[in-house]
Structure formats: C-alpha cells, structure tokens
Amino acid sequence: MFIQPIDYALAAWFVLALASTLYVGIDQYRNNPEPPVMKWGFILITLYLGPIGLLLYVLADKEPRPGEHEAFVKPLWKQGIGSTIHCIAGDATGIILAAVITATLGLPMWLDLIVEYLAGFAFGLFIFQSLFMRSMMGGSYWQNVKMSFFPEFISMNFMMAGMAPVMSFLMMGRDMRAMQPDQLLFWAVMSLGVLAGFVIAYPANVWMVARGMKHGLMTQRPSPHHHQHRHAMKSDATVPQIAAFSGVSALFLLIGMAAPANWLNLTLSARDVGGAIMPPGMVMTRDTPADAMRDMAAVDPNLATGALDPNARGDQELPFRMENGIKVFALRPSVTRWTVLPGVTVDAYAYNGQIPGPRIHIRQGDKVSIDVTNGVPEPTSVHWHGLILPNQMDGPADITQKPIEPGETYSYAFTATQHGTYFYHPHAKPDREQALGLYGALIIDPANPADEVSANLDYTVELQEWLVREGLTYPSMPMDGGMPNFFTINGKSYPATDTIRMKVGETLKLRFIGTNNGFIHPMHVHGGPFEVVARDGETIPASARFDADTVNVGPGQRYDVIWTARQPGKWLVHCHIPHHTTNNNVEEQGGGGLMLVIDVS
C-alpha cells in the first residue's frame, strides 16, 4: 500500500480527517443545538472532507456562544452550506457504498457511474431526506418523498456533475490503485469527488433555501415537554424556475458523466486495471485496451522478494543434475529487487534471482531438460532463441504450448544439435517480461573442440534497457512513456560494470547478445579493430571473417568477436549512441550505461 510519497501524505491526511470527525461528533452532541440529521450530516461530511469539513462546521454552524446559534446560522450563505451538507452527506454515502460494491464486482466504469448516481439519489431521497427529516418536516413518509424529489434531483445532479469527472479522471489516470477500495488513494479520490460535488451543488442549494424549497441550518433546543420542532417549508419558487433549474442540473450531470468518455476507456473496471501504475508520459486514450495498460504498468514493489545484495552478479553458471544421461536444469522466474548502480535499484523479473538469468552452459550433443516454475504474477513461457528443436519445445505461448500460469511448472526437453552463442527469454508477453529482466545466455560448446574459435579470455555481453521513474520500475519500450533512462551490461550500469583485465598480446572473445527489447546498439571497442568470427550462433568460415570496430547488435542478434590487446591502458567497450552511455541522462566517472573497461597491462 505504501509505495509512493502520496501514500504517506494520505495516511497523515486521514488521521487528521478522523481527528476532525471525532471533534465534530463530540461537539455536536455536547454543545451544538442542531437536529440529529444535521449533526450526522456534519459528521459524515467531516469524515469525507477532513479538516475542510471541520472548517465548514466551525465557520457556518458551531454555536460561538450559548444562545447565539439562531442568529449565527441565519445568513443565507450559511443556510446554503447546511442545505448542501444534508444533501451531500446522504448522496455521497450512497455513492461511496456503490463505488465499493461496483469495484468489488468488477463492473465497468461507465456502469459504475450510473449505479453510483442511482444509489446516491436513492439514499439521499428515500433515507436521508424523506426518512431522517420526517420528524422535522411533518407529514407522511411519501408526502416527504414527493416534497423532496425536485430539490434532491437538482442538488444530486449538480453534485454528481462535479463528482463524476473527478472520480473518472483520477481513478483512471496514471495511478489506478485509485480504483481499488483497499487503497488509500481510492478514498482520497472519493474525498476530492465529494469536495468537487459540494462546490458545484452549493449555488443551487443557496437558491433553493432562499426560495423555501429546502431546509438549511436549523436550531433545535431541548423543550420542557420534549416536543419535536417542526420546520415546515413553503416555497415561492415558480414551476418554470424549478423546471429550468432541473433541466440545467440534468445538463450538467450529462456533461459530467459523459465527458470523461472522450478521454478515458470507461469500459474498463477495477478488476481489469485496478492497481496498475502507468509510466509518466504514456498516452492513454479512450481506446487504450486493458492489456496495454497492464503490460506498461510498474512492477508492484510489494512483490519483490529476496534479500537485496548490491554486489550480486548475474550470468552465473547454472548447475544441473544428471538423470539417465540427461542434464536437468531448473529455472524459476520471480519478482526481485536488483541493484544496477549503487543507490539505484529496479523491481525486476529475474530467473533464479539473477539479472541476467543464470548461464546455461552445455555441449553440442547434450540431452537437456529445463524445468521452468513460474513465480511471476502473470503467465510466462521460455523460448530458446535460435535453436533447432521439437516444435512443442519452442516456447511461444498459445501457439506451441499453453502459457505457464503462476505457480505451474513446464519442462522443456531437447538435444543440443548446434553450438555457439544463444540465449533464452519469455515468449508470453515478452514486451513486459523480457524488458523487466527475464533473459539469459545459452552457450553451447562444439562437440569437436577444434570447431571453437578460441581466445585467451571469454566474456559475454548481455544488453538491456530500463525505465525507472519516481522509485518505480516500468518495462522499457520504444513508445510514448516507455523510453529507457538506464542501460545495463550484464545487469549493471557503468561504473558498476565489470572490468576485464588482460595482458598485452592476449586475445578476448566478446560475445555480444541482443537480450534487450527495443533498440539497436552499435557496440564499439577502443584500442583497435576486432575480428568478427560468428553471427547468430553460426561460426563464420575463416575466409569470410572480417575486421571491424563496431557491430550493430539488434534485439535477438549475437556477434562473437575476437579483440587483441595491442597496447597497455584502459580501453572502452561501449554503445556508440551517447545517450545509452549515461545514467538517467547523467555521466558518472566518464560515462554510464552500456560501458565497460578492458584494463590491459
């Protein structure tokens, strides 16, 4: 629940709201000569509006000194406050109860608004006005219903005209935790909606009090004979005036209810997208589907498990056990908090708690079985990128296999017929899951060691882009709101990346793997050209190999290159797009992001 600064501010606000409500309740029943319905009206409004409700009570209704209540509440502006409060206290209670129920049932937002209006109108008319005020108004219950109908209709329309767009835009804005009743944000939106409804309904209530159509504030003092005080109304409002006010209020209501549909997808419900937090700058329109919102949403930090080790490294070789001549591996994707830089963490998806996931290192001809147990909150699968294997082992969800649901296990079994540099990644919602860290190297040694293009050192470079804003991690995508601001090699951003140490004359095999999702990275090595010896897992014949100092590594591509240490010094390996060698647009110790150092002595 407490994952953003606003959550802590709202907690403090609601503590103030409860304290304010407690004061108003005690003071009303101990000191203030108001009828019970108005006492409860101020108590409910203070509960909804907090210190603002307390302010309204003190300025408009609280008896300043004994015996002065009648004169104190006489001004029309105060009478209008009283009228608005005993209308909205009932209406808002009905609306809020309906909002909780509709959210729990998973009803779409457009239907939610209609149900809220009907519930608020019914609660206000049949309970708060006609029932609770019957003892003061006199007459039968149904006479009071008839008498209260048009005043309630006008006031409710104006109130909902203010409340509906506030609820719609704030509930379905970036932070859609506001759609869930178990979140403080939901209650904050309700409070703001009530405040907006109060402001819009207040002028109409002032007019209705002035015309004798509604009660305002009243004084009720103890009588020696305990007689109830009657407050009968006699209105001088004309039929055309009432009809015009009713029509304008209905027009305001129509605009308030329908206008949000021009900008928001009101077919969505709390069950569809409740709890999702969208990245800053994401364009959300009336036709943005729920799937897109869920894919772009921030990772829930409350799901991140495991102890945070800032020095943890990914790409650790995955152990296996032998069963009947088969190498059996185990992978478990889960939500993990990962440090990309000192002081910068991401809430990521990780295989076996590592980013990149553990390296699966096997030999050509090996028979393997990989058990994948899903620990992330959505379905997943694993694709073995570039491998020749049985179709049912290939990994595309809903095409060659059912997605692996949370908590389920699926076993992939195949024989490695190729050798070279490969990798694995999800093929169920890869735009989200791979972007959040689900990828790992798959290195297959040749059955004949002579087929390996060898070097003194071997280093794998797995690329990734990250989007971290306001303490939340979003899947990076090349679209509005999804552009990355951190970049990693093997799960770390420079200067936290590895330093490769070599001696003059030694050779280094760099295996560049496009484990990233969204961008082509021109990977460049300082200190002289390298020889490109393999591409996409396939060794290039000696006669076709070529020298270069930069290769464009796109998502999914792999290049093996051999670089020779010709001179001592610190030589960079980096992406040649300068923005990709920064950390949140900042250079640290000479750069950032997709950079590492080869230290040659």
Image (cartoon, rainbow, N blue to C red):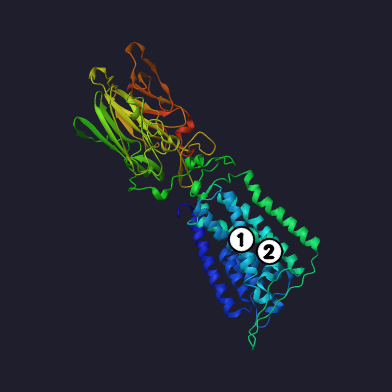
Question: Residue 457 location, x and y as percent?
Answer: 28, 26
Q: Residues within 10 Å of mark 1 (few under 14, many from 20)?
A: many
In the rendered image of this protein, does residue 77 appear above or below residue 586?
Answer: below
Residue type at tag 2? Glu
Name the disc covering residue 48, or none.
Answer: none
Q: Within the image, what quadrant is residue 416 found in?
A: top left
In the image, is 266 to the left or to the right of 83? left
Residue 202 shown left or right of residue 592 in the figure: right
Name the quadrant containing residue 45: bottom right
Q: Among all residues in the image, which is located at the extreme top?
A: 543
CA gap between label 2 and label 1 equals 10 Å
Q: Mark 1 points at which residue?
A: 120
Instruction: Kindly identify which residue carries mark 2.
Output: 152
Amino acid at circle 1: Gly
Q: Which of 320 and 574 is in front in this view?
A: 320
> How far across and how far down the image is residue 152, in percent?
68, 64
